[in-house]
Amino acid sequence: MLTQSNMVAKAWQALEDSLVYYEGRPVGTVAARDPDVEALNYNHCFVRDFVSSALIYLMKGKPEIVRNFLIETLALQSEIKQMDCFNAGQGLMPASFKVVSSYGKQYLTADFGEHAIARVTPVDSSLWWIILLRAYVKATGDFDLAHRADFQRGIIEILKLCLADRFDMFPTMLVPDGSFMIDRRMGVYEHPLEIQALFYATLRGARELLAADRQGDIYRQFISQRLNTLNFHIREYYWLDLKRLNDIYRYRGEEFGETAVNKFNIYPDSIPYWLTEWMPDTGGYLAGNLGPARMDFRFFAQGNLLSIICSLSSTKESQWIMDLIEQRWDALVGCMPMKVCFPAVEGLEWKILTGCDPKNVPWSYHNGGSWPVLLWPLVAAALKTGRTDLAQRAIKIAEQRIAEDQWPEYYDGKNGRLIGKEARKYQTWTIAGYLVAKELIDNPKNLELFSFDEDIESLAWSCPTSF
Ligand code: GLC
């Protein structure tokens, strides 16, 4: 096995090799550089993937690339995005972009989902963009960039998209399937947790970034209201622990009106059997999704970790999520931190939910595969909740294989022991994620770049909270 410092040096080399240059300036990193597999769109710079690279550059005092990225992607936001009648909403940020050259001139071409496999909408890109802008401003103090007219316009375009009235009564954001890291059909449509956590962090970030003018003040008010209701809704209705499971188990159905206890008409029979054994006595987590007669009981790692990081979960809930991860370590972390979701869907459920997707067979890829990029949110959540031991343990596990396996995109199997069947090697967010995790352990103060404390402003509102 390589020594730790060798591993870090190798990771830096691989990260620098992944840089994308535009007119001589670094503007991003490609998704992967696997020499043995056809690139497809892995030679694009993905917004969500770049966040891991951006964070390590910010932590290391090299903000230039992040600044360039923010400027170039902002310019893409206002592009006319139409192909074959697929039309991206105004304000949407691209899933990815690429530099192309023609007649000696360079251009950026973006994909807003109109080229992506299955034409999925990258809802998370716009959210990550604001979270990243805030991290950049925190690292550099460069409020001038965020206050530039084009940046204020960009932020407001995103807020308009997020806060628009729709055919939905919930404070959570309604999205189509595959609109975030899990960008394939996996039954993650409607109100998936990961999007809600990103939405929450985005609103909190935007509130800090909006200029102190009339328009900024108006949006700040909308934001505070929404933060309050979103926070209440998630803490109250998404939370699952043994007590809540007992409540749901004894729910009555078909309740009408204001006094309904079972507000979403969740039928007890929909509680999966595995959960009644798996839920520890102490510990809990936020459900994957909630809608009419639908609670997705699967554990989604990124949504839970981000909820801790941005204080969408309460202090006690955050501790309990980490307790659950500790007690179910073998299932959730196993041989590579960590599973994107647990458990995998199998059999008929797999057929119906994924549309028979051969890439998402049980315990592979998005369907229970292990993603090393999740190491940094795991370490961040562990540090935020004072569980340094868990952070160190996770890094140690990753270090046993990650570099020697050449930085795979994901691992397969119930315990994450196999390199993913179709995983790319030299996957940039695996590389950058490892560096971010190491840097966070060495300098936990870096957590402040992307984390949020409990939101006092929104707690001042009148909605009750669960814990
Ligand atoms: C896959 C992942 C997605 C990632 C992309 C590029 O499509 O599902 O989350 O952004 O690869 O790495």
Image (cartoon, rainbow, N blue to C red):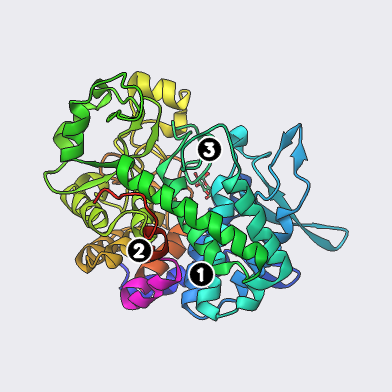
The residue singled out by tag 3 in the image is 175
Let me know if residue 335 is in the magenta part. Answer: no
Q: Distance between the residues labelled 3 and 1?
A: 25 Å
Question: How crowded is the residue under tag 2: few (<14 C-alpha within 10 Å), some, or many (20+)?
Answer: few
Q: What stretch is highlighted in magenta?
A: 439-451
Mark 2 vs ligand 1: CB below 8 Å: no
Mark 1 vs ligand 1: CB below 8 Å: no
Provide the secondary structure element on which disc 1 rests.
helix
Q: Residue at x 32, y 69 (%)?
A: 2
**Pick the front one: 464 or 177:** 464
**Pick the front one: 217 or 264:** 217
Q: Position of residue 304 (x, y in %)?
A: 34, 50
Question: How crowded is the residue under tag 3: few (<14 C-alpha within 10 Å), some, or many (20+)?
Answer: some
Q: How far apart are marks 2 and 3 (CA)?
A: 26 Å
Residue 135 got which mark? Answer: 1
Q: Distance between the residues labelled 1 and 2?
A: 18 Å
Q: Could you tell me the amino acid type at mark 1?
A: Ala
Q: Nearer the viewer, mark 2 or mark 3?
A: 2
Against 320, residue 341 (above or below) is above
Q: Could you tell me the amino acid type at mark 3?
A: Val
Q: Position of residue 228 (x, y in %)?
A: 42, 53
